[in-house]
Amino acid sequence: MLFEINVLKEKHHMHLIHTAPKTKGKLIFTHQEPASVHFDKVDLGNEQILTIALNGEEAQKITINGMLYEFPSFSIVPLVSGQVFKFEKPEMITAWQYSRDFYCLVDNYFEISCLGLLFFGFSGNLFLTLDEAYREKLRGLQQLFLEEFNTVDTIQTDMLQMLLKRLIILVTRLAKEQYLGGKVYEEEKFDIIRQFNLLVDQEYKSQHQVSYYADKLNKPAKTLTRIFSGFNYSTPSMLIQERIIMEAKRLFCYTNLSVKEIAYDLGFNDAAHFSRFFKNTANLNPSDYRKQQVSA
Protein backbone atom coordinates (compact mmCIF):
# COMPACT_ATOMS: atom_id res chain seq x y z
CA MET A 1 0.00 0.00 0.00
CA LEU A 2 1.57 3.29 -1.11
CA PHE A 3 -0.23 5.58 1.30
CA GLU A 4 -0.90 5.36 5.01
CA ILE A 5 -3.85 7.34 6.31
CA ASN A 6 -5.00 6.99 9.87
CA VAL A 7 -8.27 8.80 10.50
CA LEU A 8 -9.86 8.99 13.94
CA LYS A 9 -13.04 11.06 13.99
CA GLU A 10 -15.63 11.99 16.54
CA LYS A 11 -17.72 14.95 15.42
CA HIS A 12 -15.03 17.39 14.26
CA HIS A 13 -12.13 15.68 16.06
CA MET A 14 -9.48 14.10 13.88
CA HIS A 15 -5.95 12.81 13.75
CA LEU A 16 -4.64 12.25 10.22
CA ILE A 17 -1.30 10.78 9.12
CA HIS A 18 0.15 10.74 5.63
CA THR A 19 3.35 8.85 4.78
CA ALA A 20 5.24 9.83 1.64
CA PRO A 21 5.75 6.68 -0.44
CA LYS A 22 9.33 7.48 -1.52
CA THR A 23 10.95 9.05 1.53
CA LYS A 24 8.64 7.57 4.23
CA GLY A 25 8.49 11.06 5.72
CA LYS A 26 5.31 11.82 7.67
CA LEU A 27 2.84 14.66 7.87
CA ILE A 28 0.44 14.62 10.84
CA PHE A 29 -2.64 16.82 11.06
CA THR A 30 -4.42 16.90 14.43
CA HIS A 31 -7.59 18.93 14.90
CA GLN A 32 -9.40 19.42 18.22
CA GLU A 33 -8.55 16.00 19.64
CA PRO A 34 -9.67 15.83 23.29
CA ALA A 35 -6.83 13.46 24.20
CA SER A 36 -3.35 14.98 24.29
CA VAL A 37 -1.62 11.65 23.59
CA HIS A 38 -0.94 12.69 19.99
CA PHE A 39 1.19 15.58 21.21
CA ASP A 40 2.76 13.93 24.23
CA LYS A 41 4.26 11.04 22.29
CA VAL A 42 4.66 11.17 18.52
CA ASP A 43 6.09 7.75 17.72
CA LEU A 44 8.28 8.46 14.70
CA GLY A 45 11.45 6.84 15.91
CA ASN A 46 14.48 9.12 15.74
CA GLU A 47 13.03 11.45 13.10
CA GLN A 48 13.25 15.17 13.73
CA ILE A 49 9.69 16.46 14.08
CA LEU A 50 8.68 20.09 13.58
CA THR A 51 5.34 21.36 14.84
CA ILE A 52 3.13 24.34 14.04
CA ALA A 53 0.37 24.56 16.65
CA LEU A 54 -2.69 26.80 16.36
CA ASN A 55 -4.75 27.66 19.44
CA GLY A 56 -8.50 28.28 19.17
CA GLU A 57 -10.73 30.92 20.68
CA GLU A 58 -9.77 30.32 24.34
CA ALA A 59 -6.45 31.28 25.91
CA GLN A 60 -4.67 28.41 27.64
CA LYS A 61 -1.35 27.29 29.11
CA ILE A 62 1.32 25.39 27.25
CA THR A 63 4.17 23.58 28.98
CA ILE A 64 7.39 23.49 26.95
CA ASN A 65 10.26 21.47 28.42
CA GLY A 66 8.81 21.89 31.88
CA MET A 67 8.24 25.66 31.60
CA LEU A 68 4.71 27.10 31.69
CA TYR A 69 3.76 29.74 29.09
CA GLU A 70 0.62 31.62 28.15
CA PHE A 71 -0.78 30.48 24.80
CA PRO A 72 -3.16 33.29 23.77
CA SER A 73 -6.37 32.67 21.85
CA PHE A 74 -6.11 32.72 18.07
CA SER A 75 -2.34 32.40 18.05
CA ILE A 76 0.32 30.09 16.65
CA VAL A 77 3.54 28.69 18.09
CA PRO A 78 6.22 26.77 16.12
CA LEU A 79 8.04 24.05 18.06
CA VAL A 80 11.17 22.05 17.26
CA SER A 81 11.94 18.41 17.95
CA GLY A 82 14.01 19.15 21.08
CA GLN A 83 10.96 20.60 22.81
CA VAL A 84 8.59 18.40 24.78
CA PHE A 85 5.26 20.17 25.08
CA LYS A 86 1.81 19.70 26.52
CA PHE A 87 -1.36 21.76 26.08
CA GLU A 88 -3.76 22.61 28.88
CA LYS A 89 -6.70 22.28 26.44
CA PRO A 90 -5.64 19.97 23.57
CA GLU A 91 -9.22 19.96 22.30
CA MET A 92 -8.72 23.60 21.24
CA ILE A 93 -5.56 22.86 19.21
CA THR A 94 -4.99 22.36 15.51
CA ALA A 95 -1.47 21.15 14.76
CA TRP A 96 0.66 20.31 11.77
CA GLN A 97 3.63 18.05 12.53
CA TYR A 98 6.10 16.85 9.95
CA SER A 99 9.45 15.15 9.60
CA ARG A 100 12.34 16.52 7.58
CA ASP A 101 11.95 13.55 5.24
CA PHE A 102 8.50 14.85 4.35
CA TYR A 103 9.40 18.49 3.74
CA CYS A 104 12.81 20.12 3.63
CA LEU A 105 14.26 22.82 1.36
CA VAL A 106 17.64 23.23 3.02
CA ASP A 107 19.83 24.52 0.22
CA ASN A 108 18.01 27.29 -1.61
CA TYR A 109 15.20 28.58 0.58
CA PHE A 110 16.66 29.41 3.96
CA GLU A 111 13.59 31.43 4.98
CA ILE A 112 11.06 28.62 4.50
CA SER A 113 13.11 25.43 4.72
CA CYS A 114 12.62 22.88 7.47
CA LEU A 115 15.68 24.52 9.05
CA GLY A 116 14.56 28.03 8.20
CA LEU A 117 13.68 31.29 9.92
CA LEU A 118 10.53 30.04 11.60
CA PHE A 119 12.32 27.41 13.67
CA PHE A 120 15.90 28.69 13.88
CA GLY A 121 15.86 32.37 12.92
CA PHE A 122 14.27 33.92 15.99
CA SER A 123 15.07 34.00 19.68
CA GLY A 124 12.88 32.19 22.22
CA ASN A 125 9.41 30.75 21.75
CA LEU A 126 7.37 32.55 19.08
CA PHE A 127 3.74 33.19 19.99
CA LEU A 128 2.20 34.74 16.89
CA THR A 129 -1.15 36.50 17.10
CA LEU A 130 -3.64 36.06 14.25
CA ASP A 131 -5.80 38.96 13.15
CA GLU A 132 -9.05 38.25 11.31
CA ALA A 133 -7.35 38.22 7.89
CA TYR A 134 -4.83 35.59 9.01
CA ARG A 135 -7.57 33.57 10.73
CA GLU A 136 -9.48 33.42 7.45
CA LYS A 137 -6.36 32.28 5.58
CA LEU A 138 -5.76 29.55 8.16
CA ARG A 139 -9.38 28.38 7.98
CA GLY A 140 -9.03 28.08 4.21
CA LEU A 141 -5.79 26.14 4.53
CA GLN A 142 -7.29 23.76 7.10
CA GLN A 143 -10.08 22.92 4.68
CA LEU A 144 -7.63 22.31 1.84
CA PHE A 145 -5.54 20.00 4.05
CA LEU A 146 -8.64 17.98 4.95
CA GLU A 147 -9.64 17.67 1.30
CA GLU A 148 -6.18 16.46 0.31
CA PHE A 149 -5.97 13.94 3.14
CA ASN A 150 -9.17 12.44 1.74
CA THR A 151 -7.91 12.40 -1.86
CA VAL A 152 -5.74 9.32 -2.22
CA ASP A 153 -3.92 9.30 -5.56
CA THR A 154 -0.40 9.41 -6.98
CA ILE A 155 0.04 13.18 -6.48
CA GLN A 156 -1.36 13.39 -2.94
CA THR A 157 2.10 13.77 -1.36
CA ASP A 158 2.99 16.59 -3.77
CA MET A 159 -0.23 18.43 -2.97
CA LEU A 160 0.24 18.07 0.78
CA GLN A 161 3.84 19.30 0.50
CA MET A 162 2.64 22.30 -1.48
CA LEU A 163 0.01 23.11 1.14
CA LEU A 164 2.56 22.72 3.94
CA LYS A 165 4.88 25.12 2.11
CA ARG A 166 1.99 27.64 1.91
CA LEU A 167 1.44 27.27 5.66
CA ILE A 168 5.14 27.80 6.43
CA ILE A 169 5.28 30.88 4.18
CA LEU A 170 2.19 32.30 5.87
CA VAL A 171 3.51 31.77 9.40
CA THR A 172 7.02 32.99 8.46
CA ARG A 173 5.56 36.24 7.14
CA LEU A 174 3.60 36.61 10.35
CA ALA A 175 6.75 36.06 12.43
CA LYS A 176 8.68 38.65 10.44
CA GLU A 177 5.86 41.17 10.85
CA GLN A 178 5.51 40.70 14.59
CA TYR A 179 9.11 40.03 15.69
CA LEU A 180 11.15 42.23 13.37
CA GLY A 181 8.98 45.26 14.01
CA GLY A 182 10.52 48.32 12.40
CA LYS A 183 13.95 46.73 11.98
CA VAL A 184 15.42 46.49 8.51
CA TYR A 185 15.39 42.89 7.30
CA GLU A 186 18.90 41.98 6.18
CA GLU A 187 18.91 38.53 4.64
CA GLU A 188 22.62 37.82 5.13
CA LYS A 189 22.58 38.75 8.82
CA PHE A 190 19.40 36.82 9.49
CA ASP A 191 20.84 33.76 7.80
CA ILE A 192 23.89 33.97 10.07
CA ILE A 193 21.53 33.96 13.08
CA ARG A 194 19.71 30.95 11.64
CA GLN A 195 22.94 29.08 10.97
CA PHE A 196 24.24 29.86 14.46
CA ASN A 197 21.00 28.60 16.09
CA LEU A 198 21.07 25.49 13.93
CA LEU A 199 24.69 24.72 14.82
CA VAL A 200 23.98 25.24 18.52
CA ASP A 201 20.97 22.90 18.29
CA GLN A 202 23.21 20.24 16.74
CA GLU A 203 26.32 20.59 18.92
CA TYR A 204 25.42 22.27 22.22
CA LYS A 205 26.04 19.06 24.17
CA SER A 206 29.71 19.00 23.25
CA GLN A 207 30.51 22.62 22.33
CA HIS A 208 29.80 25.37 24.87
CA GLN A 209 32.04 28.18 23.59
CA VAL A 210 31.00 30.97 21.20
CA SER A 211 34.44 30.82 19.58
CA TYR A 212 33.72 27.32 18.25
CA TYR A 213 30.55 28.44 16.45
CA ALA A 214 32.20 31.66 15.24
CA ASP A 215 34.97 29.61 13.61
CA LYS A 216 32.37 27.35 11.99
CA LEU A 217 30.66 30.41 10.52
CA ASN A 218 33.94 32.11 9.56
CA LYS A 219 32.97 35.15 11.62
CA PRO A 220 34.72 36.81 14.58
CA ALA A 221 32.85 36.26 17.85
CA LYS A 222 32.45 40.04 18.21
CA THR A 223 30.69 40.17 14.82
CA LEU A 224 28.19 37.53 15.95
CA THR A 225 27.49 39.49 19.12
CA ARG A 226 26.95 42.67 17.12
CA ILE A 227 24.53 40.97 14.70
CA PHE A 228 22.47 39.46 17.51
CA SER A 229 22.43 42.76 19.36
CA GLY A 230 21.13 44.50 16.24
CA PHE A 231 17.96 42.40 16.47
CA ASN A 232 17.69 42.79 20.25
CA TYR A 233 18.45 39.10 20.74
CA SER A 234 20.31 37.54 23.63
CA THR A 235 24.06 37.28 23.19
CA PRO A 236 25.43 34.16 21.45
CA SER A 237 26.85 32.99 24.78
CA MET A 238 23.48 33.32 26.48
CA LEU A 239 21.76 31.43 23.64
CA ILE A 240 24.15 28.51 24.08
CA GLN A 241 23.47 28.51 27.82
CA GLU A 242 19.71 28.71 27.25
CA ARG A 243 19.83 25.69 24.91
CA ILE A 244 21.77 23.66 27.48
CA ILE A 245 19.34 24.65 30.25
CA MET A 246 16.34 23.86 28.03
CA GLU A 247 17.59 20.32 27.49
CA ALA A 248 18.55 19.93 31.17
CA LYS A 249 15.02 20.91 32.23
CA ARG A 250 13.54 18.49 29.71
CA LEU A 251 15.67 15.67 31.10
CA PHE A 252 14.81 16.54 34.70
CA CYS A 253 11.10 16.58 33.85
CA TYR A 254 10.79 13.55 31.60
CA THR A 255 13.56 11.14 32.63
CA ASN A 256 14.88 9.55 35.81
CA LEU A 257 18.50 10.32 34.97
CA SER A 258 20.62 11.48 37.88
CA VAL A 259 22.20 14.93 38.02
CA LYS A 260 25.56 13.33 37.27
CA GLU A 261 24.19 11.48 34.23
CA ILE A 262 22.52 14.63 32.88
CA ALA A 263 25.69 16.65 33.47
CA TYR A 264 27.72 14.10 31.50
CA ASP A 265 25.12 13.99 28.70
CA LEU A 266 25.34 17.78 28.37
CA GLY A 267 29.11 17.87 28.11
CA PHE A 268 30.07 18.61 31.73
CA ASN A 269 32.83 16.45 33.19
CA ASP A 270 32.04 17.58 36.72
CA ALA A 271 28.52 17.31 38.19
CA ALA A 272 29.27 20.06 40.72
CA HIS A 273 30.24 22.43 37.90
CA PHE A 274 26.99 21.59 36.09
CA SER A 275 24.94 22.15 39.26
CA ARG A 276 26.49 25.60 39.74
CA PHE A 277 25.86 26.43 36.09
CA PHE A 278 22.23 25.29 36.36
CA LYS A 279 21.59 27.25 39.56
CA ASN A 280 23.18 30.43 38.19
CA THR A 281 21.08 30.23 35.02
CA ALA A 282 17.79 28.76 36.26
CA ASN A 283 17.89 30.26 39.80
CA LEU A 284 17.30 26.81 41.33
CA ASN A 285 19.63 23.95 41.99
CA PRO A 286 18.86 20.76 39.99
CA SER A 287 17.32 18.77 42.84
CA ASP A 288 15.00 21.61 43.85
CA TYR A 289 13.95 22.11 40.23
CA ARG A 290 13.10 18.42 39.85
CA LYS A 291 11.09 18.42 43.10
CA GLN A 292 9.21 21.51 41.93
CA GLN A 293 8.24 19.81 38.67
CA VAL A 294 7.11 16.62 40.42
CA SER A 295 4.84 18.55 42.79
CA ALA A 296 3.41 20.78 40.04
Image (tube, rainbow, N blue to C red):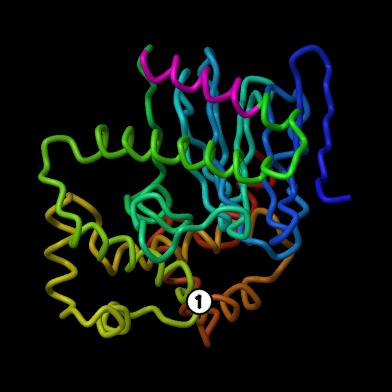
Q: In which quarter of the image is residue 172?
A: top left
**Majority secondary structure in the magenta region:** helix
The question of residue 9 being in magenta is answered with: no
Work out whether residue 9 or residue 162 is closer to the camera in this orientation and state it: 162
Residue 235 image offset from top left, x and y in percent? 23, 62
The spot of residue 225 in percent (x, y) is 17, 67
Q: Please state which of residues 238 and 127 is positioned toward the viewer in this rendering.
A: 127
Taking depth in this image into account, of 89 and 153 the one nearest to the observer is 153
Residue under the image location 83 percent in, 21 percent down: 9
Q: In which quarter of the image is residue 256?
A: bottom right
Task: Determine the residue positioned at 74% across, 15% down.
Answer: 12
Q: In the rendered structure, does residue 142 fall within the stretch colored magenta?
A: yes
The kind of residue tagged 1 is: Lys
Residue occupying image coordinates x 78% and y 53%? 43
Q: Which quarter of the rendering shows the C terminus? A: top right
Q: Mark 1 points at which residue?
A: 205
Give the magenta part as a residue range.
133-145
Taking 251 as reference, is 132 left or right? left
Question: Which residue does the image show at 13% across and 72% down from the upper left?
Answer: 223
Tell me: residue 148, above or below residue 100.
above
Asked if residue 243 lies left or right of residue 121, the reply is right
Dot 1 falls on a residue whose secondary structure is loop
